[in-house]
Amino acid sequence: MCIRDSNNADVALELDMEFRTLGTTVTNGIPDILNREYKGGILLKNGEQAAVAGMITKSDEKSLNGLPLFSGIPGFNVLTGESSKQEEDDELLILITPHVLLDPERPESPEIWIGK
């Protein structure tokens, strides 16, 4: 993240974010890793809040366990099989509020008095 304070107290942000999360799908006992990236820029006032990224993930998983062939036959699957259903909803919202911190060794612009 790069922060620059211009003369008019605006803050320019250049964002480069990467998200790595474990997925709900499992292959050979190993969960899948989901990769998401966000690159962008935004111009805000000091202390102004903005939503820069959002992500909604929805997954449905259905499984049928039981004796081969018999669990797929209607009526027999109640006796020889077991079915399960799993639903998952995830939401992510990223808000940014920049605050300009002044360097105590470098004070703000000095006052200039002009007179006779």
Image: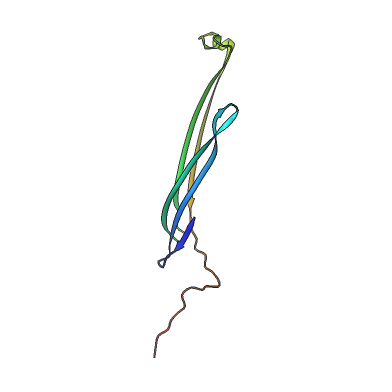
**Number of marks in the image?**
0
Residue pictured at 46% horizontal, 75% vertical? 109
* Image location (x, y in percent) of residue 89: 50, 34
x and y percent of residue 14 in the render?
45, 54
**Residue farthest toward the front in the current orientation of the protein:** 28
Q: Is residue 7 left or right of residue 29?
A: left
Figure quadrant of residue 30:
top right
Q: Please give the name of the residue rendered at 58% of the width and 10% of the height, measured from the top-left corner.
A: 79
Q: On screen, 3 above or below 51?
A: below
The answer to whether residue 41 is above or below residue 71 is below
Residue 67 vs 34, above or below: the answer is above
Q: Is residue 113 above or below residue 62?
A: below
Residue 105's spot in the image, x, y percent? Answer: 55, 73
Most distant residue in the right direction: 29
Residue at 47%, 78% (x, y): give it: 110
Q: How is the image coloured?
A: rainbow
| Residue 101 in the image, given as x and y percentages of width and height | 52, 65
* Residue ID at (49%, 48%): 17
Pick out the residue farthest to the bottom: 116
Quarter of the image for the C terminus: give it.
bottom left
Closer to us: 39 or 53: 39
